[in-house]
Image: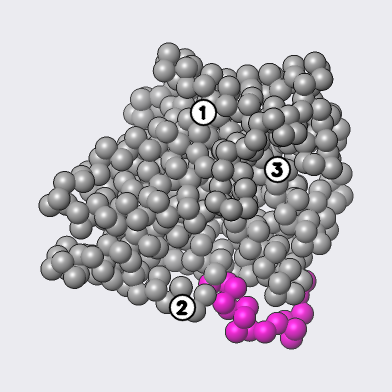
Amino acid sequence: MFEKIFRLKQNNTSVKTELTAGLTTFMTMAYILAVNPSILGAAGMDQTAVLIATCLASFVGTACMAFMANLPFALSAGMGLNAFFAYTIVGIMGYPWQVALLAVFIEGIIFLVLSLTNIREAIFNAIPLSLKTAVSVGIGLFIAFIGLQNAGICVDNGSTLVSITDFTANFSTAGISALLALLGTLFTFILYLKKVKGSALLGIIGTWAAGMVCQLAGVYVPSPEAGYYSLFPSVQMTDFNAFFNTFGQCFNVDLNTIDWFSFIVIIFSFLFVDLFDTLGTLIGVSAKAKMLDKDGKLPAIKPALLSDSVATAVGAVFGTSTTTTFVESSAGVAEGGRTGLTALTTAVLFLVSIFFAPVFTAVPGFATAPALIVVGFLMFSAIADIKFSEKNYTDAVPAYICIISMPLFYSISEGISLGIISYTVINLICGKGKKIPPLVYVLSVLFVLKYILL
C-alpha cells in the first residue's frame, strides 16, 4: 500500500527509513508544542487551546504535504511569526488576538490564490541556482545557531551579542544542560560518521536519557522559575473543551474597530515573511536532499505550496498563528526521508501528541540541539557547490550575503531578500544584467519596498 501511494522504490527508500525519518523530524519539532502555547499565551490566548490547535494544524498541513506533494516536509506554527503575532500585533499595536488570527486567515487565502495561479512556483523557479544553494547553506548555519541557543551554549552576554555560556555558573541547570548538549552533539556526530541509521533520533533520545540520569543523581536540579523543568514526562490527558476557546474566533471580530491601513500592513507583513520562509525552506531542504532537477526546480513545488497555504488558513480557524513548512524537516531528510510517508509519520505523531502532549513537550531543548547542529553541518556542506572563483564573483558574493544574513538576522526570509537584492545590483552594475530573470528584478523592487514601507 505504501509503495503504491508514496512510490518508495522510485525514490530509493524503504518503509523503515521513512518511519524513522518521520519520527526524527517530529522529535526535532516537538519543542513547538511547548513554545507556541507559551508565546501565544502572552497574547491572552488559552494555552491548552493553542496546544490543541497547533497539533491539529500541524497534522492537517503535514498530511496535505504527504498526500498532495509526496514530499518529506512537515509543517507547524512558524517561529518568529508567532512572536510577531503576540508581541507586535497584540502587544505593541494593541489588536485583540482574534484580529491577528483573522489576518493570518486572510494571508492563508491569499497564499492559496497565489499558489493556484503559479505565482509562488514562478518565484521559486526564478531564483538563480547559486542562491538556491546558498539558501541551503544559510539554513544549515541558521538551524545550527538555533540548536546552540536551545541548548544554552550560545548566550547573549550583553556586550558582544553572542558568547559561549559560563558552564560553571548555575551548573545544576544551565551549565549541565549545555554540557549535555555538547556531549550529545559529539555522540550524534560519531553515530553519523559510523553510518548508524537513525543517528539524529538516537542522539536526541540518548541526550535526553543522559539528562534523566543526571536528574536522578542530583546533578541536574529542576528550577521551573528559571525555565528548567523536570526531564521526566508526566502522563496526563488534555482538556479538549479548551479548544473551543480559540476555534473559529478569527471570525468573531468587530470589523468597525479595525484600522484598515494598519491591518493591510499586518497581512502583508505575514505574507512576506511566510512566503520567503517557506520558499527558503523548500529550496534549502530540497537542494540538500537532491530533489531539485537539473534546472534547479522542485517538480512537486505546486502541491507543496498549496499544502502550506491550506495549513495556514486552517490553522487560523483552529486558533494558531501562521502554519508553515519547518526547516527542521531537514533532520528527517538527513535520516533518509524522501517521500510523503515521512511527512505522514510526523503528521500522525502530531495528532497523537494531542492526547499525550506532556510526554512530548518534556523533551528538553538541549536534547534536540545535537540533531539540529549535526543537520546544520550536513546542509552547510552544500557550500562546495558554490563556485568562488573570480569569474563567478557576481554569483558568489550574493550567495555569501544570503548565507551570513540568515543566522545573523535570525531569518530565512531576510537572507533571501538581501541575497536577491545584492544579486540584482551587483550583476546589473557589473554589466551582466542579461542573465537576471525578469521576475528577479520584480522581487528586488518588492524587497526594497518592504524595507521602506514595512
Query: Which color scheme does this rendered protein use?
Result: one colour
Is residue 267 covered in magenta? yes
- Taking the image as shown, residue 148 lies to the left or right of residue 393, namely right
Q: Residue at x 36, y 30 (%)?
A: 11
Mark with earlier residue (1, 2): 1
Check if residue 175 falls in the magenta segment.
no
Foreground: disc 2 or disc 3? 2
Three-letter amino acid code at the position of disc 3: Leu
Residue 68 drawn above or below residue 402:
above
Q: Amino acid at mark 1?
A: Ala
Residue 28, position in %: x, y?
A: 59, 35
Residue 158: image location, x then y, percent: 62, 53
**What secondary structure is found at the residue carrying circle 1?**
helix
Residue 452: assigned label: 2
Where is mark 1, residue-wise?
Answer: 21
Q: Which mark is residue 33?
A: 3
Q: Are marks 2 and 3 in contact (CB under 8 Å)?
A: no
